C-alpha cells in the first residue's frame, strides 16, 4: 500500500535521523550531521576535561585549561570594553600594510624576472638562497634595524609574504602557453598587446594563488612578530597574558585570529572564483 | 590565369646539419585556392605552415605573399591551430572579437563583427560561453571565426580537425567548405588524412620525409560537393596512398 503524501514527506526526514540515506532534506543528511557532531564533540571534550580536572580529579592546575564558556566570557568582556577591537585593528593594520608591500614588490619583481632571462638569472638564485630560511629568524634583526615600532613588524610581514607572491608570479608570467602568444600574434597583436591581453590574464590564476597564500602567511607570522617588541595586537595580547596566567585570554586570542583568518581566506577564495570563473573547476 | 598568392622559393629549414626539417621547397599557390599539405609525421608540413604564418624563419630561401616577403606574423594570414588556442579567460564572443579589439574598433563595432562571424560558423547563441564550456567541434568553430574576423586573405590551418572525433570531423570539413565558398580566401591546410585532403583541396602537396620536401603535387579537378565513394575519388585516394606509403616506410614503422 502506497504511503500518503504526508507520510512520504516525513519519511525521508526520519530516515535521515536514523542515519539512513535522505537526499531530499539536506539538513538531515548523514555526512552533514557527522560533521556538525565533530565540532560539538570537540567542544564537549574540552569542556569535560576542564570541568573534570577542576572539580573531580585534579590532574593539573585548573588555571591551565579554562572551560570554553570562560573563554567566551572573557571575549565578551573584552569586546564590550573595546580592548579586543583595539588589538584586532592593530594586528590587521600591520598585516594589511605588510601584505600590500609584499604584493606590490612580489608582483613587480616577479613580472620583470619572468619576462627577462637575464633578470631571472640574476635575481632568482639569490631569492632561492634566502627562501629556506624561516622568516622568523630575521625578526630580531629587523627589530634592531627598524626599532620596536610598526616598521619592524610591517617590514617583517612584507619579507615573509614576498616569497610566495614572487614565485607564483614568476611562474605564471614565464609559463604562458606559447601557442596563445602565437595566436595573438597572428591576430595582429603587438608585443605590448600580447603582454596586456595574453600574458597578464594567463598569469592571473597563479598570481592570485600567490596573493592568497601570501595573505595567509602574513596572518600566520603576525602572531610571532607581535610576541617581540609590540604593545598591541592579538599576538601581543596572547603573549602578555602569560604574566598573570590568563589562559582564557590566550585561547581567546588564538580563536579570534583563527576566525578572522578564516573569513579573510574564504572572502579571498570567493573573489578568486569570481575573477576566474572561466576556469573549468573540477573540484571546489 | 589566376595570380599567385603565395610563392615559396627555395625554402629550407634546418636546426643542425643533422636536423633538416625541410629541403628546397618550391611552390606557387594560386589566389583563393585550397591547398592541402599532406604527409606523415616529420615531413615538415607544420614547419612549412609556420613559416608561411611568419612564426619561424626559413634558414634558406624566402616566402612571398602578394609579392612581399613574409617577416613575422600578420593578421592578413589568419591561423587555426589543432589545439584551438582559444583564450580561456574570454567568452566565445570576446575571443572572436580579439582581432577587432586589437584594431581598436569601438566596443559596439567589435561585438557586432564578432557576432556576425559567430553566426557564420553556426554559434550565434553561444557567444557568452567560455571555451571550457564548449565541445571540441564548437571550440574549433570559434577558432575559425576568430581567424576570419580579421578579414585575412590567407587562412592557414594546422590539422584543425585532428583532435575531433570522426563524425564531428566530417561535419567540420563540410562546414569549412561552405564558409570558404561563401567568402573565398587562399587556404593552406595541413593534414595527414588522405581522405580529408581529397575532400577539401584543389591541390594536394604530397610531402616526403627524411628530409622533408615536396614529393608530388596533385591537382584535384573534382567538383564540390565531392563524393567519397565516387570512382575518381577512390582512384586518386589509391594513388596518393601509394605515394604516402613509400614515405611512411622510410620512417621504419612498417
Image (cartoon, rainbow, N blue to C red):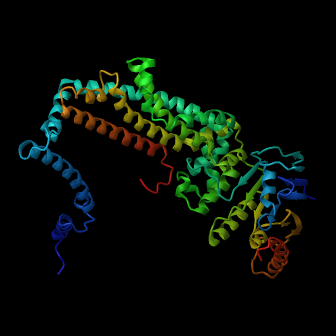
Q: Nearer the viewer, residue B201 or A182?
A: A182
Q: Is residue A183 above or below residue A163?
A: below
Residue at 58% over, 31% down:
A109
Residue extending furthest front?
Answer: A59
Question: Where does the image place residue A278, in percent across and percent down from the top left?
Answer: 51, 49
Q: Position of residue B24 (x, y in %)?
A: 91, 57
The residue positioned 69% from the left and 35% from the top of the image is: A118
| Frontmost residue, B116 versus B49 | B49
Kindly identify the residue that appears in the image at 74 percent across and 60 percent down: B180
Q: Quadrant of the N terminus of chain B?
A: bottom right
Q: Position of residue B190 (x, y in %)?
A: 76, 62
Q: Is residue A239 left or right of A14 when viewed as pictured?
A: right
Q: Judge whether A12 appears above or below A76 on screen.
A: below
Q: Quadrant of residue A214?
A: top left
Q: Quadrant of residue B17?
A: bottom right
- Drawn side of residue B82 relative to residue A269, left or right: right
Q: In terms of depth relative to the viewer, which is nearer, A201 or B3?
A: A201
Residue A101 in view in this figure: yes
Tag count: 0
A215 left or right of A58 in image: right
Q: State the image coordinates of residue A213 (x, y, percent, origin top left).
A: 44, 40
Q: Toward the viewer: B183 or B132?
A: B132
Identified at 59% across, 33% down, the residue is: A126
Quadrant for the C terminus of chain B, please: bottom right
Judged from this view, the residue extending furthest toward the left is A55
Asked whether the viewer can see residue B4, the reply is no
Amino acid at each position: 500500500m502506497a504511503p500518503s503524501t504526508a507520510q512520504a514527506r516525513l519519511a525521508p526526514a526520519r530516515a535521515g535521523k536514523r542515519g539512513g540515506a535522505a537526499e531530499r532534506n539536506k539538513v538531515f543528511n548523514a555526512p552533514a550531521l557527522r560533521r556538525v557532531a565533530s565540532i560539538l564533540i570537540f567542544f564537549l571534550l574540552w569542556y569535560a576535561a576542564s570541568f573534570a580536572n577542576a572539580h573531580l580529579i585534579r590532574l593539573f592546575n585548573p588555571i591551565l585549561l579554562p572551560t570554553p564558556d570562560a573563554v567566551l566570557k572573557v571575549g565578551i568582556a573584552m569586546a564590550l570594553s573595546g580592548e579586543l577591537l583595539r588589538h584586532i585593528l592593530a594586528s590587521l593594520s600591520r598585516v594589511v600594510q605588510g601584505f600590500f608591500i609584499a604584493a606590490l614588490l612580489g608582483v613587480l619583481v616577479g613580472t620583470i624576472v619572468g619576462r627577462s632571462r637575464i633578470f631571472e638569472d640574476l635575481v632568482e638564485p639569490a631569492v632561492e638562497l634566502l627562501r629556506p630560511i624561516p622568516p622568523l629568524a630575521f625578526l630580531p634583526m629587523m627589530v634592531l634595524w627598524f626599532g620596536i615600532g610598526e616598521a619592524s613588524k610591517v617590514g617583517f610581514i612584507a619579507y615573509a609574504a614576498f616569497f610566495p607572491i614572487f614565485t607564483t608570479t614568476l611562474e605564471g608570467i614565464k609559463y604562458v602557453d606559447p601557442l596563445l602568444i602565437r595566436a595573438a600574434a597572428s591576430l595582429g597583436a603587438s608585443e605590448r598587446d600580447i603582454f596586456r591581453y595574453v600574458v597578464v590574464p594567463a598569469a592571473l590564476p597563479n598570481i592570485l594563488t600567490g596573493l592568497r597564500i601570501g595573505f595567509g602567511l602574513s596572518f600566520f607570522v603576525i602572531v610571532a612578530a607581535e610576541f617581540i617588541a609590540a604593545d598591541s595586537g592579538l599576538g601581543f595580547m596572547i603573549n602578555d597574558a602569560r604574566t598573570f596566567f590568563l589562559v582564557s585570554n590566550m585561547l581567546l586570542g588564538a580563536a579570534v585570529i583563527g576566525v578572522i583568518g578564516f573569513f579573510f581566506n574564504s572572502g579571498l577564495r570567493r573573489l578568486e572564483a569570481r575573477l576566474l570563473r572561466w576556469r573549468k573547476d573540477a573540484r571546489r | 590565369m589566376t595570380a599567385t598568392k603565395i610563392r615559396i622559393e627555395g625554402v629550407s629549414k634546418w636546426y643542425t646539419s643533422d636536423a633538416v626539417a625541410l629541403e628546397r621547397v618550391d611552390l606557387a599557390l594560386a589566389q583563393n585556392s585550397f591547398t592541402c599539405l599532406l604527409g606523415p609525421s616529420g615531413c615538415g608540413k607544420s614547419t612549412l605552415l609556420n613559416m608561411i604564418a611568419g612564426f619561424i624563419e626559413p634558414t634558406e630561401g624566402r616566402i612571398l605573399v602578394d609579392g612581399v616577403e613574409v617577416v613575422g606574423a600578420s593578421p592578413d594570414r589568419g591561423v587555426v591551430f589543432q589545439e584551438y588556442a582559444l583564450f580561456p579567460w574570454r567568452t566565445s564572443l570576446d575571443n572572436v572579437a580579439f582581432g577587432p579589439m586589437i584594431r581598436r574598433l569601438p566596443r559596439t563595432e567589435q561585438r557586432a563583427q564578432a557576432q556576425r562571424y559567430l553566426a557564420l560558423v553556426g554559434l550565434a547563441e553561444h557567444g557568452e560561453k567560455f571555451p571550457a564550456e564548449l565541445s571540441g567541434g564548437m571550440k574549433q568553430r570559434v577558432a575559425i571565426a576568430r581567424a576570419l574576423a580579421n578579414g585575412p586573405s590567407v587562412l592557414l590551418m594546422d590539422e584543425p580537425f585532428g583532435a575531433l572525433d570522426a563524425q564531428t570531423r566530417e561535419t567540420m570539413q563540410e562546414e569549412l567548405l561552405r564558409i570558404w565558398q561563401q567568402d573565398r580566401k587562399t587556404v593552406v591546410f595541413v593534414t595527414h588524412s588522405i581522405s580529408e585532403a581529397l575532400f577539401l583541396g584543389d591541390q594536394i602537396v604530397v610531402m616526403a620525409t627524411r628530409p622533408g620536401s615536396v614529393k608530388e603535387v596533385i591537382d584535384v579537378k573534382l567538383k564540390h560537393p565531392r563524393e567519397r565513394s565516387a570512382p575518381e575519388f577512390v582512384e586518386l585516394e589509391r594513388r596518393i596512398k601509394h605515394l604516402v606509403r613509400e614515405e611512411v616506410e622510410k620512417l621504419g614503422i612498417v
